[in-house]
Image (cartoon, rainbow, N blue to C red):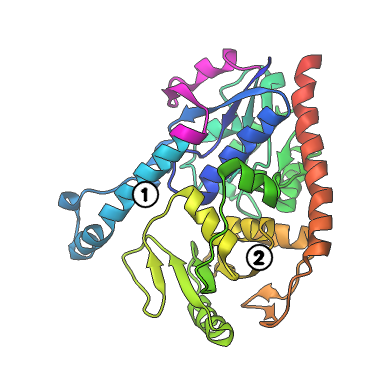
Amino acid sequence: MKKIGILTYHDTTNFGAVLQAFALQRKIEKLGYNSEIIDYKCPAITNRYKITPIYKSQNLKQLIKGILTNKNKRKLKQDFNLFNKEQQKISKKFYDKETIKECENKYDMIISGSDQVWNLDLSGNDTTYMLDFIEDSKKKGTYAVSFGYKEVPSKYYNKTRDAIKSFNNILVREKQGQEIIKKMISKKSDVVLDPTLLFGKEEWCNLLNIQRKDDGKDYILLYIIAPNKNIIKFTKALAKQHKCKIIYINDSYKRILGMKNIGHCTPKEFLEYVYNAKYVVTTSFHGVSFSINFEKEFFYALSNEKGNFNSRIENLISILKINNRNINVQYDINSKLDYKKISSELDLVRKQSITLLKKELDDINDK
């Protein structure tokens, strides 16, 4: 059986990153291939989720923040490590920039993706996720790779172009990425769904035993990863109108009155919070994708920050022709999503994405 290595952001405490890695691996195995996630340690990603000990605090604000959040962060890290151990197939050896070259001969193909693995701002200028360590271009694969930005910053342009020009086939997550590749290296690429959308509601429930929970109280799930000044006000108004409580998943030291603040939960618990919510309000791409998977009424807000990663949400909303959900542009608080129509469109794009992934994998046998 052919062996596939997956190179992605997997060792994080980010729900979307871990669940997209889980989904891609499970889908590859369902297509008949042996696979494992390559345990590559990217310094920038590792540092992003590193817990700073209280005694290393640089100022009073950092000290207070550490006192209020470090316990939750350690528990969150333990929960994610357990999920990875129980649910993921990860290489026994971990690799860094100096040793990643060893992987070329251990796998029949290495797939880069999904997530923003081609975003050099995020990876700290690390082109390993562009598979620059592989000499045999036939072993280079991709699935739903994302740049995260609409245009490659000039400081990364030449480096990015040189790193990706040897790919024979590129499967990107957003239309913006497709346009970047066409402009940069004059190659065709295909837009595919994020791995989390390759499985439908029933499949996700079966994969992780997601449970229906009913305590008789409807709630709105609020999940924020990008700051937006209007989202709290909107969520409270929505809760008041529909007589719902609010559950706010948030590992920040800041707590918001009038709602239940959840400091940490496991990836499975996160999915159950989405699955059982009456509404979801989010700034997260994966908050949107799982709302769609579980056929939830949802609203979203985009980031106002410069250099934001809004394109991934905008692209998905555009593909599925969803309207009136952006709370900062146009929304109807009383509207209902037509999931019969959305599911029909999603099933079509899902089949196309799986077909393209299968073709990429099956091409190994012809090489």
Badge 1 local density, few (<14 within 10 Å), some, or many (20+)?
many
Is label 1 in a helix, a strand or a loop?
Answer: helix
Q: Identify residue for label 1.
A: 76
For the residue marked with disc 2, what is the amino acid?
A: Lys
Depth order, front residue of 212/266:
212
Region rendered in magenta: 85-108
User: Residue 21 or 339: which is nearer the viewer?
Assistant: 339
* Disc 1 and disc 2 in contact, CB within 8 angstroms: no
Quarter of the image where one finds residue 329: bottom right
Look at the picture and state if 6 lies above or below 252. Answer: above
Q: Considering only vertical position in the picture, is 19 above or below 284?
A: above
Q: Looking at this rendering, what residue extends furthest in the left direction?
A: 55
- Seen at 73% across and 75% down, the residue is 336
In this picture, residue 346 sits left or right of residue 283: right
Please identify the quarter of the rendering in which residue 138 is found.
top right
Inspect the magenta stretch and tell me whether residue 98 lies in it.
Answer: yes
**Residue 365 % position (x, y):** 78, 15
**Residue marked by disc 2:** 296
Viewer-proximal residue among 205 and 173: 205
Measured along the vertical axis of the image, is residue 120 above or below residue 169? below
Residue at 28% x, 58% y: name it. 69
Residue 146 visible in the snapshot: no
> What SS does tag 2 mark?
loop
Q: Is residue 238 left or right of residue 49?
A: right
